[in-house]
Amino acid sequence: MIDRCHTGMYCRTVRYLTTRDGRLPQYSRGMIQYEIENLGRHLVFVQWQNGMSTPVFREEIEICDQPVSIAA
């Protein structure tokens, strides 16, 4: 089921990540598109500042209180 309660919120990575679309350094910033539960895993789909749009696990990001720039 798709969860959109965090849609439009800003986030950043808590550590270096290797994703299906490429690398994301620690503190990479992005905007949450939606979340989904899949096979017992909680995935968050994020539009990253570098133009990638890729899923990450919830524990790999932190949601920011203040908006962060997502300009490339």
Image: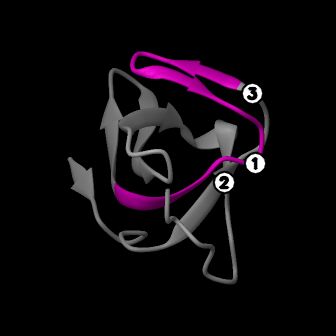
Q: Say if 43 sits above or below 16 in the image.
A: below
Q: The residue tagged with tag 3: helix, strand or loop?
A: loop
Pick the residue in front: 12 or 38. 12
Image: 44 above or below 17: below
In the rendered image, the vertical position of residue 11 relative to residue 44, given as above or below: below
Please give the range of residues in magenta.
17-33
Q: Look at the numbered discs 3 and 1 and tell me whether their residues touch, using CB distance below 8 Å.
A: no
The disc, 2 or 1, on the residue closer to the chain's N-terminal end is 2
Assess disc 1: are there few (<14), some (14-19) or many (≥20) residues with their C-alpha within 10 Å of its C-alpha: some
* Residue 66 is inside the magenta segment: no
Q: Is residue 19 left or right of residue 34?
A: right
The disc label shown at residue 16, or none: 3
**Residue type indicated by callout 2:** Arg
For this view, does 14 lie left or right of residue 20? right
Label 1: element kind? loop
Could you tell me if the residues under marks 2 and 1 are in contact, i.e. CB atoms within 8 Å? yes
Distance from disc 2 to disc 1, alpha carbons, whole Å, reads: 5 Å
Q: How is the image coloured?
A: one colour
Residue at 41% in and 25% down: 40
Q: Say which residue label 2 marks.
A: 12
Residue 7 position by quadrant: bottom left
Residue 22 among those drawn in magenta = yes
Identified at 33% across, 20% down, the residue is 39
For disc 2, the neighbor class at 10 Å (few under 14, some 14 to 19, many from 20) is many
Q: Image check: 24 left or right of 50?
A: right
Mark 3 vs mark 1, CA separation in Å: 8 Å
- Residue 27: mark: 1
Of helix, strand and loop, which one carries label 2? strand
Give the mark nearest the N terminus, 3 or 1. Answer: 3
Which residue is at the far bottom? 66
